[in-house]
Image (cartoon, rainbow, N blue to C red):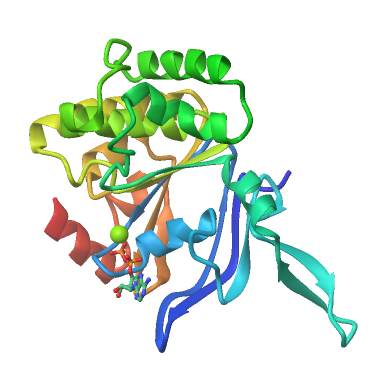
Amino acid sequence: MSAAIGIHGAVKAFGEHVVIDGVDLALPAGSVTVVLGPSGSGKSTLLRTINRLEALDRGVVTVGGEPIGVRLRTGRNGLPRWKALPERALRRQRSRIGFVFQHFELFPHLTALENVAEGPVAAGVPAATAKARARELLDRVGLGDRGATRPRQLSGGQQQRVAIARALALDPSVVLLDEPTSALDPELVGEVLGVIRDLAESGTTLVIVTHEAAFAREVADHVVFLDHGRVVEQGPPAQVIDAPQHPRTRDFLSRVH
Ligand code: ADP
Ligand code: MG
């Protein structure tokens, strides 16, 4: 069986600056992967290539075995090459990949419930069905009573929980979370980590960029340490977090602990 998420020979540069420098990863269905690495090491870019918020210069990403944003065509020279999918097809693929941003990115003019229901409605789900499902999801993240509230009336932790509910609204097979707790006041981190822990236990494939090493040790099946756009070290948390082999990993962990 192919991996839930496959990253094959990924290379991405911004101008001359190579940010993802030959990454290969295979993440099994239901697994929880934590990506660690210093600021600027390419963690966000790597996550964003998975749902093609960033297009790769080389390589391909697959989700559920399906290449994201591209299909294989025969070029004029008779050799196969990747061709970009039309925007509509890409949107359909993206709907199966939930994304949670550091700064929540909720629509300020919509209520919590509308924020969660908006994606499904845009995808053609009848409004009543989308709202009923949104209510269930808000319940699941402990905000069943806040559906009518606008983001600015919610705490950061509540906003991020709404954002997680929104990421689940189209029943994605994978959910990507980019530093989901790093914009939160310390006392609000726990409630969001709690929701992510439940999600991890539910069997959704997760990729989480986080500096919360204790949380990573607890929930991750797999830890990837990224530096200068390369996977320097990867393995179970007991290996990468508790007994890192590479000096860069050791140095990083000694600073975040
Ligand atoms: P991390 O999330 O690990 O902090 P990023 O993936 O955000 O790292 O960024 C990696 C590098 O790529 C950084 O040097 C950043 O400045 C650069 N970068 C990220 N996005 C862009 C962009 N859209 N244009 C130019 N440079 C970018
Ligand atoms: Mg980042």
Pick the quarter of the image with the N terminus. top right
Residue 98 position in % (x across, y down): 49, 40
Place residue 161 in its image quadrant.
top left
Frontmost residue, 231 versus 85: 85
Q: Position of residue 136 (x, y in %)?
A: 44, 13
Would you place residue 21 above or below residue 107 in this image? below
The total number of labels drawn is 0
Depth check: 112 or 178 in front? 112
Q: Looking at the rendering, which quadrant does residue 85 occupy?
A: bottom right
Question: Looking at this rendering, what residue extends furthest in the front direction?
Answer: 109
Direction from residue 139 to residue 151 in the image, left or right: left
Residue 213 in the figure: left or right of residue 113: left
- Horizontal relation, residue 230 to residue 1: left or right: left
Q: Determine the residue located farthest toward the right in the rendered image.
A: 78
Q: Quadrant of ligand 1?
A: bottom left
| Residue 165 against residue 59 in the figure, above or below | above
Image location (x, y in percent) of residue 152: 18, 33
Q: Residue at x 30, y 17 (%)?
A: 148
Which residue shows up at 61% across the image and 21% down it? 126
Residue 21 vertical position relative to residue 205 in the rendered view, above or below = below
As rendered, which of 176 and 117 lies closer to the eye? 117
Horizontally, is 30 left or right of 135 in the view? right
**Is 236 placed above or below 38 here?**
above
Q: Position of residue 72 (x, y in %)?
A: 79, 66
Residue positioned 14% across, 31% down in the render = 188
